[in-house]
Structure formats: structure tokens, C-alpha cells
Amino acid sequence: MPMLTRRRCRDRQDCWRVFYGDVCVGTIGRRAGVPIDVDQWEWGCGFYPGTEPGEGYSGTGATFEAARTGFEAAWRTFLPMRTEADFQAWRDQRNWTAWKYAMHDAGLKMPTQRPNGRSRCFCGLEIDIRGMDQHVRDAHRPVAA
């Protein structure tokens, strides 16, 4: 079973993304714009797609450690309610988004942007609207995160 790991957000030095294996399952970060006499840290536990609105948890803490402790307690409740299909839904969306941007960066139109519903992928294969999702799953799934 994967462990939780934290990775600092690229655009904020006071925010960490929390991962369970290769799936981002939440964040812990300093709150912005709050009075100094309230909790300065917040956390959120959940991910989308893969969970429905209202299924996640969130809270605050006076310190980073308090927020981390709150996150970990919520995670122990949240994880048993998840299935592998929930995590796979998040991975599929991550892969689809990466593929879409790679097509854009290569200057290629997606099949949905062409009148005949066909296009060429940046990997060289011809694809159509019906087979596009399967192509992304089969040919453009990351080997490891």
C-alpha cells in the first residue's frame, strides 16, 4: 500500500500537495488573508475526479503540524471508502489532460476539432473520435509517476 508523501507546490512555498502513490489526494497550506488570531493553516483531503462533491474533508490548524495531523486523521477515514476505480479515474483525467496539452503544443488538432472526426496524434498514429479515449489510455499512460 502506498504511503502519503508531500511535495511543495511550484507556485507557493507555503503549500504542499499530498500524494498517495501517484494520485494527488489533498493539500496542506498557509491560509491567505485571514486575521492573525485564527488558524493560519488549512488542509483539504479528497480528489476529483474519483470522489463526489461532499465526500472530501477539510479543516484548519494553528500550525503546519496541527494541519498535517488533521489531514492524516481525515485520510484514515477517507481512504477505506475509496476503490481502485476512484484512483484510476483521477489518473485517467491526468493522462487525458497531459495528452491534450501535448497535442496543442505540437500544433495538432484533436479529432473533435476536425470536420471528419479524424486526426493524427503527436505519436504518429491516426486516431478518430471513437478511438481517441482508448488511444490515450493505451499509448500515453505514464510508466511511473
Image (spheres, rainbow, N blue to C red):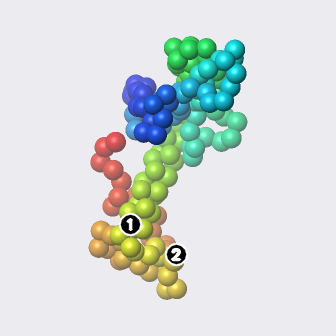
Q: State if disc 1 and disc 2 touch (CB < 8 Å).
A: no
Looking at the image, residue 40 lies above or below residue 113: above
The residue labelled by disc 2 is 112
Q: Residue at x 49, y 86 (%)?
A: 116
From the image, which quarter does the N terminus lie in?
top left
Looking at the rendered structure, the secondary structure element under dot 2 is: helix
Q: Position of residue 55 (x, y in %)?
A: 66, 34
Which picture quadrant has residue 136? bottom left
Looking at the image, residue 133 lies above or below residue 25: below
Q: Position of residue 98 (x, y in %)?
A: 42, 56
Between circles 2 and 1, the one closer to the viewer is 1
Q: Residues within 10 Å of mark 2 (few under 14, many from 20)?
A: some
Looking at the image, residue 136 lies above or below residue 79: below
Q: Position of residue 17 (x, y in %)?
A: 47, 33
Looking at the rendered structure, the secondary structure element under dot 1 is: helix
Looking at the image, residue 143 lies above or below residue 135: above
What amino acid is found at the position of numbered circle 1 in the picture? Asp
Q: Position of residue 75 (x, y in %)?
A: 55, 24
Give how far apart the Cα atoms at labels 2 and 1 are: 17 Å
Which picture quadrant has residue 99? bottom left
Q: Residue at x 49, y 73 (%)?
A: 130
Which picture quadrant has residue 43? top right
Instruction: Report the disc number at residue 18.
Output: none
Q: Residue at x 65, y 42 (%)?
A: 52
On the picture, is 27 further left or further right than 8? Answer: right
Between discs 2 and 1, the one toward the N terminus? 1
Pick the residue in front: 76 or 121.
Answer: 121
Pick the residue in front: 74 or 18.
Answer: 18
Instruction: Report the disc number at residue 105.
Output: 1
Q: How many marks?
A: 2
What amino acid is found at the position of numbered circle 2 in the picture? Thr
